[in-house]
Amino acid sequence: MLEIGSFRSRACQGVTRRSFVQAAATVPWALNTLAGRATAASGQRAKSVMMIWLWGGPSHIDTFDPKPEADSHVRSPFQSIGTRTTGEHFTELLPRLANRSHHLTVLRSCRFSGNHDMLCLTGSRSRGANRDPNFGSIVAQKHHDSSLPPFVSIAPQTTLSHGFQCISSPGFDAGRLGAAYNPFIVRCSSESEVQIPSLKLLDGLTPHRLSDRRLLLNQLDLLQRHLDSDAINALDKHHHNAYSLLTSSDAFRAFDLRQESPRTHAAYGKTTFGQSMLLGRRLVEAGVPYVQVNWSLGVDGLEEGPLMGWDTHRNGFGQLMNYHCPVFDRAFSALLDDLHERGLLDQTLVVATGEMGRTPEINKIGGRDHWATCSTLWAGGGTTGGRVIGKTDRNGGEPVSSPVSPLMVGTTIAEAMGIDSQARAELGVLRGGTVIEGML
Amino acid sequence: MRFCQPICPGLLLILALLVGVEAAWSQEQQLTEDGRLKRDAAYCAHSRCIVFTQEDHRTGKMRLMKLNLEDLSVSPFEAESDESRREFSVSADGNVYCFNVVRGLSSSIRVFDRKASQQATLPKMDKDPWSNWPAISPDGKTVVWVEGARVMYAYNFAENKGRESVRRFTAPGDDYSDYMPSFFPSGKQLAFASNRDHDFEIYLMNSDGTGQQRLTESRGIDMHPAVSPDGKRVAFTSNRDGNYEIYVIDLATRKSQRVTQNEEVDNFACWLPTRPNELVYVGQRDGKTDLYRISLGSLSLAAE
């Protein structure tokens, strides 16, 4: 089900210009025309990026960097298993991904901050109005030629009662690049329901009525007549783009998970993350340049479902083996299969990461605490699968090869999308960043 | 004519074997159909239903639901709450039950006695605000639970005097966790999962915490033990064959056998006291998570 709700902002003469401007501003790419359209730079290896954001910080030792020879207070209780890549092991919690390692580059020498920050989404610690943009906003600034939004962030439909949320925190947005490049937020549920909060514009604009394009256009014409002519002229391009999603059946269909077969739904699993990954695949297939799939709304690893992040201090092993890893293993494996079978993997760069790893030492409450060293997964889009880049020490504490920083992650993503050093300098983003050696 | 050619005896034998295998697995009966995320199945004699945990897709919270085994209808076990509730455990007569409550950043155990209209929230014994995996004794007088994924405590609910009614059950391990306790029907023993010998195995102990011994020994994860109504077998989850399946081990022979076989996850087995040769469990099929029931008629757990 695709849900477009209502948005009330009416004066006695009808819809006000102010409300229309507000509505347009909530549809970020609607304002992109002000900045002009940029052309893709040469050297672009990927057409799209899927950033799989595992907020909370997955334990690298219990997933993609097992240390069976580590000290007993470090060693994972989970066995390491062989993968399709010679010499590469995952833990037993990820059997499906182990069987698809030929698609994956496992980057084991990441060294992030060790805190719940957004370094790995922006590459820097900048704050305030001048803060650095999310990588997706950088891509959006350079690739916004489609009727679809250039940067979509998919989040669970539910709300958190505590903590910060991934759809409203600095680091998830465009920062100093401006609101035009903020992510277009979509909410998804385990029931394959998709909500588009930004398009809750008009009373009575139901999915059924949206399917009647003539009726929809009449409504939009009515809206225009309530605005003065100057406003129409000024907002014409914005208007066109803001409602292009609504009026383009092709674009709109990209958000409709009902178009998928039961078999495909099943492959991803009936979980919020699984269906979010499927929606992400639909969006890159439709041409969205950057999709961020958010595992959870927050970091805390407390209760199963879309409220549970990867911050598994407590009861961590129980959570990893009962919830996180089975859900992740299934959905990420399905994504790789799906992209590969559709011929999309080569043109889609998939990156799965959290903001950090977890301590080598097992704590006293059945989990691991915050730690800067971590592993990230890369696939498709200019990378070569079946590889491991980097290495950590015997206990998984520190990289023994050149550490990879969040800035390097962002720079590599930008480079894959054809945003070269000159383009980055012109935008004033990812300054000093270098491409991860051997990744592209 | 190609279709008139006789089928070779070998092929017939293979077909017969395949039919036999199919017949064995067809004993699995699907009990729910919504496919939503589930866990923690437990039989409640009071309402003759299976109580389980299910994700509420609207709120993201986990809710206790009940499955009527007669008509397979599913309904909420209790009124909707703004907190997650899970890990239901119930006494033999169904009158005393407990569950884990997650609210904000803390988790606690609540116990209810239907007959006495008595309830308790178990006291916090450690600094860490995390309590889970409650198990209630068959007589409803004792609740064992895990605090901080580390130490098991027992609460005398019959006494119900807060911290005065608590005793430590297991010693804290430096780098291991004890999980998922489950009482024997006699109330004299428990089974539980632990990684004290490195990977997760099933262990047994007496109800005073003594006599701890390892029951399973396999490469991989063994977890979620559930003791059979006659106290002679333990069902548990294991990935020893590559993914999570339900197994049953005979306590006398220590011989175990897999009872589910599927490429997807099977977990959280519980026994049906009214049908002591059947298990209900949480299974995933085609990406959907539902409750299933299987008969153990053909198990071979005798000593060789």
Image (cartoon, rainbow, N blue to C red):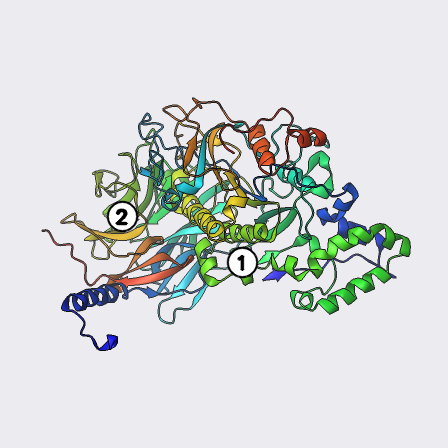
Q: Mark 2 highlights which residue?
A: B241
The chain carrying label 2 is B
Q: Give x and y (percent) for residue A210.
A: 68, 65
Q: Give x and y (percent) for residue A261.
A: 49, 62
- Residue B156, located in which quarter of the rendered image? top left
- Residue A75, located in which quarter of the rendered image? top left
Callout 1, which amino acid?
A: Ser
Whether residue A67 is visible to the viewer of this picture, yes or no, is: yes
Quarter of the image containing the N terminus of chain B?
Answer: bottom left
Q: Give x and y (percent) for residue B50.
A: 36, 61
Q: Give x and y (percent) for residue B263.
A: 33, 54
Between B300 and A80, the one nearer to me in the picture: A80
Between B31 and A388, the one nearer to me in the picture: A388
Mark 1 crowd level (few <14, some 14–19, many ≥20, 10 Å Cα):
many
Q: Secondary structure at mark 2?
A: loop
Q: Is residue A209 left or right of residue A272?
A: right
| Image mark for residue A89 | none
Residue, x 15% and y 65% (percent of image)?
Answer: B10
Q: Is residue B271 left or right of residue B104?
A: left
Callout 2, which amino acid?
A: Asp
Q: Mark 1 highlights which residue?
A: A192
Is residue B230 shown above or below A43? below
Mark 2 crowd level (few <14, some 14–19, many ≥20, 10 Å Cα):
few
